[in-house]
Image (cartoon, helix red, strand yellow):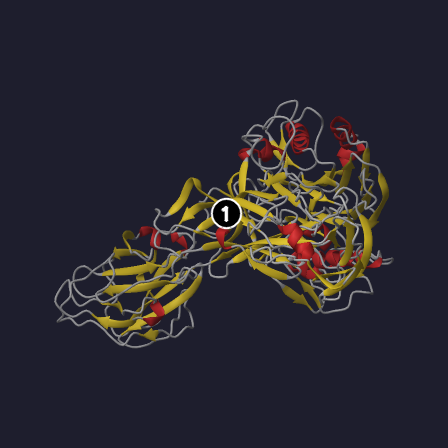
């Protein structure tokens, strides 16, 4: 007889893991509203002002609402500090620790950067110019904060770089960024340290290279440090300045997904930059805008009640940025004991960063989305209070992978995995996108076909209110995850056939310049995301100058057909279009001439945005003898894209402004479906028997039999090779230990032999006494 020793394991799944963290904020309090206490006109000024003034009170209310542990405040006026207003603000909000950057050897003696903190400063210093140099507009404060519960206390840097768009301003910003990056290197801060750089970087305009200092615009007392060696680069991408160590840019968003921090210009100049280690951990950020602050269920958790709509606008011309950052590594999903089922509902997930312990490949995060956005990538589909982990895959697809660790004392052999597949956005007749799942054990993928989901392609276009839900469930057996080992669960979004980016081209499609009914028609591709005002048709005559018809914005055109491919067609009747030889049109999109065509020959423009450009002759033209209302010039072809069309004269065919041309087929690639996973549950099936042979999978794993084959058993045979001897025979595996035990009553067992497995059958002989009425044998198999 044999006694099988079963191995079994419970998979315990944690919720989204959290480490030790803190909340940081940066707020350029900037220009704010001042109401003179004795009367007079209200005006904007800098600094926080006195308690009781709208500027002071609104800044205080915003900081109280977003509730950071540490905040970098930019544009603190020296008068505010000297009058004690900054200290009063800190005390009222519960910040006992204040570090204020002085104006020593700087050009701006009025405005300063300060840190307010709930936690003590372990150190505080300033980033300055080297001895003998005077280069910085404002000094940059640096603090190391003693965050409770961790020994990996963060270094925080609060920056406010030189503003302005002159070459001298960009040069000063370049030097200030050089000082900041040099500080990181000099202090030995590395990619695996906890540091966070935040503030108003004023990075704008365009990249450029300085081979010398600008000849004008710099302060008269400007002195460049001797360590600055030309050429030096000015970048508008902040991460481009950093190499040793590199940094990760974190992009906060308003709750409507806007990334604007400086509303008056629609720009993003207030930034979070982190060490790569901090950037790879769970984190959540937001740009606070009181105009969108309508509920405590929206955005990051906040203190108190939503503020009045106009609070942000009254406090500053900047919006505050804030975020929750992890300082210690969080742990994977951990399995410790049998008998549990734990689910993951992605509560608190904002769709902006990897929800630990998940990682993504093949896309970028796009925030929270109810299904209305067309941006490709990953997101939190649904509402902030009930999110799911979603994909809008495009042509590349993508995957999300969670890591698990078996910290039990037994071997994992079987799981039950269930989840809800959801669809939040539909493209009718779009790509038949799928979600598939696999376990990765020991680096080997194991497909889970019963968990595959295919999105619908027959629903109406656009967002699906509330999403659709399809439950998926599967038992996975035949696993062998040893104690201490890890494995992964991966979901992959695979695009269906025929997908691709929507064409964004804009082109002149048809026109007529002879007789009555002169018109121009423009087609706008479905991928064009600009405004109609960005599209302008300029009319040229053959002498190279613009005609008296001047320029016509597409906002003045009449909307015509929207084709099945979602191309939009606009047309306008325009009398007086030039009809000489040659004449033409320039099509301007976003301030750039994208097409310059002519009829009756080619010419060089001498005015307007096309100045200096040579037109492309379309090689067809109208004649005065053509029938009125017919014989327009237009693009045609069956291949679907403007680059495949050819100009032709539609002789004998009526004009078709606002409609596709005769013989013209406009096509676009199929578009993806918005799909998601939610309500994930993983259960360890203790004692699960996949093949129904009476032996649990865990037992069969120990004995080396096939848990998927009911005919596969561990069998012990016996024989009597000679009188007084019994011979047992049983299979063995390397790495297993085999103990033979005997008994005469089935109640008391004694060990009669121990053997190490070799991979070959074991023959073991034992003496037997003829006087015994019976003797029983069993083999105990263990797997260290």
Where the C terminus falls, by quadrant? bottom right
Query: At 25% from the left edge and 61% from the top edge, which residue is drawn?
Result: 660
Label 1, secondary structure: give it.
strand
Query: At 41% from the left edge and 44% from the top edge, which residue is drawn?
Result: 463
Q: Which of 427 and 117 is in front in this view?
A: 427
Residue 230 picture location, percent across and down? 74, 69
Residue 275 visible at all: no
What is the residue that sits farthest to the top in this orientation? 38
Residue 616 picture location, percent across and down? 34, 74
Residue annotated with mark 1 = 676
Residue 765 picture location, percent across and down? 78, 62
Q: Would you say 615 lies left or right of 301 here? A: left
Classify residue 537 by image quadrant. Answer: bottom left
- Mark 1 packing: few (<14 Cα in 10 Å), some, or many (20+)? many
The number of callouts visible is 1
Residue 479 visible at all: yes
Query: At 70% from the left edge and 50% from the top edge, which residue is drawn?
Result: 3
Query: At 66% from the left edge and 67% from the top edge, which residue is drawn?
Result: 209
What is the residue that sits farthest to the front in this orientation? 771
Q: Which of 765 and 434 is in front in this view?
A: 765
On screen, 152 above or below 640? above
Q: Nearer the viewer, residue 751 or 262?
A: 751
């Amino acid at each position: 007889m044999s006694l099988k020793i079963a191995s079994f394991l419970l998979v315990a799944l944690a919720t989204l893991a959290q480490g030790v963290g803190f909340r940081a904020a940066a707020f350029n309090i900037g220009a704010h509203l001042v109401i003179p206490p004795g009367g007079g006109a209200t005006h904007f000024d800098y600094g926080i002002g006195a308690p009781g003034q709208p500027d002071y009170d609104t800044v205080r209310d915003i900081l109280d609402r977003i509730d950071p542990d540490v905040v970098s405040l930019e544009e603190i006026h020296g008068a505010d500090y000297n009058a004690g207003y900054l200290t009063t603000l800190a005390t009222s909000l519960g910040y006992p620790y204040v570090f204020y950057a002085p104006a020593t050897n700087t050009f701006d003696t009025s405005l300063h950067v300060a840190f307010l903190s709930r936690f003590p400063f372990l150190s505080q210093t300033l980033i300055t110019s080297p001895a003998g140099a005077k280069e910085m507009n404002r000094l940059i404060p640096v603090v190391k904060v003693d965050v409770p519960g961790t020994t990996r206390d963060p270094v925080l840097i609060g920056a406010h770089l030189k503003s302005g768009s002159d070459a001298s301003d960009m040069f000063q910003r370049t030097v200030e960024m050089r000082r900041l990056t040099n500080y990181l290197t000099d202090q030995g801060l590395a990619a695996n340290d906890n540091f966070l750089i935040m503030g108003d970087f004023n990075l704008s305009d365009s990249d450029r290279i300085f081979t010398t200092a600008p000849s004008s615009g710099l302060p008269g007392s400007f002195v460049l440090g001797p360590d600055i060696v030309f050429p030096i680069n000015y970048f508008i991408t902040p991460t481009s300045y950093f190499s040793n160590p590199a940094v990760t840019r974190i992009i906060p968003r308003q709750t409507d997904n806007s990334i604007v921090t400086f509303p008056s210009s629609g720009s993003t100049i207030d930034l979070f930059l982190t060490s790569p280690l901090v950037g790879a951990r769970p984190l959540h950020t937001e740009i606070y805008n009181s105009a969108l602050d309508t509920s405590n269920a929206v955005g990051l958790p906040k203190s108190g009640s939503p503020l009045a709509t106009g609070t942000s606008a009254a406090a500053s011309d900047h919006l505050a940025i804030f975020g929750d950052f992890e300082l210690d590594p969080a742990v994977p999903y951990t399995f410790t004991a049998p008998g549990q089922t734990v689910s993951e509902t992605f509560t608190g997930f904002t769709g902006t960063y990897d929800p630990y312990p998940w990682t993504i490949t093949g896309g970028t995060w796009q925030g929270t989305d109810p299904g209305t956005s067309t941006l490709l990538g990953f997101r939190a589909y649904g509402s902030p209070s009930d999110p799911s982990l979603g994909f809008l895959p495009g042509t590349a697809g993508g995957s999300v992978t969670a890591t698990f660790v078996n910290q039990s004392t037994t071997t994992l052999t079987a799981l039950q995995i269930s989840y809800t597949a959801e669809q939040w956005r539909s493209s009718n007749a779009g790509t038949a996108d799928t979600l598939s799942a696999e376990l990765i054990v020991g680096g080997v993928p194991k497909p889970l076909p019963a968990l595959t989901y295919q999105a619908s392609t027959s629903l109406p276009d656009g967002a699906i209110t509330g999403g659709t839900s399809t439950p998926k469930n599967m038992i996975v057996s035949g696993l062998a995850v040893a104690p201490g080992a890890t494995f992964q669960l991966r979901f992959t979004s695979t695009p269906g056939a025929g997908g691709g980016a929507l064409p964004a081209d804009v082109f002149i499609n048809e026109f007529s310049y002879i007789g009555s009914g002169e018109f121009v028609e423009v087609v706008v591709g479905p991928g064009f995301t600009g405004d109609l005002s960005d599209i302008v048709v300029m009319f040229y005559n053959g002498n190279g100058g613009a005609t008296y018809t001047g320029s016509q914005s597409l906002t003045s055109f009449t909307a015509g057909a929207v084709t099945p491919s979602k191309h939009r067609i606009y047309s306008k009747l325009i009398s007086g279009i030039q009809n000489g030889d040659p004449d033409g049109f320039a099509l301007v999109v976003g301030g750039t001439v994208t097409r310059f065509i002519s009829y009756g020959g080619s010419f060089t423009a001498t005015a307007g945005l096309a100045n200096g450009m040579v037109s492309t002759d379309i090689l067809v033209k109208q004649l005065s003898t053509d029938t009125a209302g017919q014989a327009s010039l237009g693009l045609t072809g069956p291949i679907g894209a403007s680059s495949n069309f050819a100009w032709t004269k539609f002789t004998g065919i009526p004009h078709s402004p606002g409609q596709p041309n005769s013989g013209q087929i406009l096509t676009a690639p199929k578009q993806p479906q918005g799909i998601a996973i939610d309500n994930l549950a993983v259960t360890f099936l203790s004692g699960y028997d996949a093949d129904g042979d009476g032996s649990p999978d865990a037992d069969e794993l120990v004995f080396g039999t096939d848990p998927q084959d009911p005919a596969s058993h561990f069998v012990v045979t016996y024989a009597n090779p000679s009188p007084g001897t019994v011979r047992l025979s049983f299979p063995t595996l390397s790495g297993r230990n085999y103990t033979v035990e005997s008994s005469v009553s089935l109640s008391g067992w004694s060990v009669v032999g121990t053997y190490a497995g070799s991979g070959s059958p074991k023959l073991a002989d034992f003496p037997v006494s003829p006087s015994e009425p019976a003797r029983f044998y069993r083999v105990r198999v263990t797997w260290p």
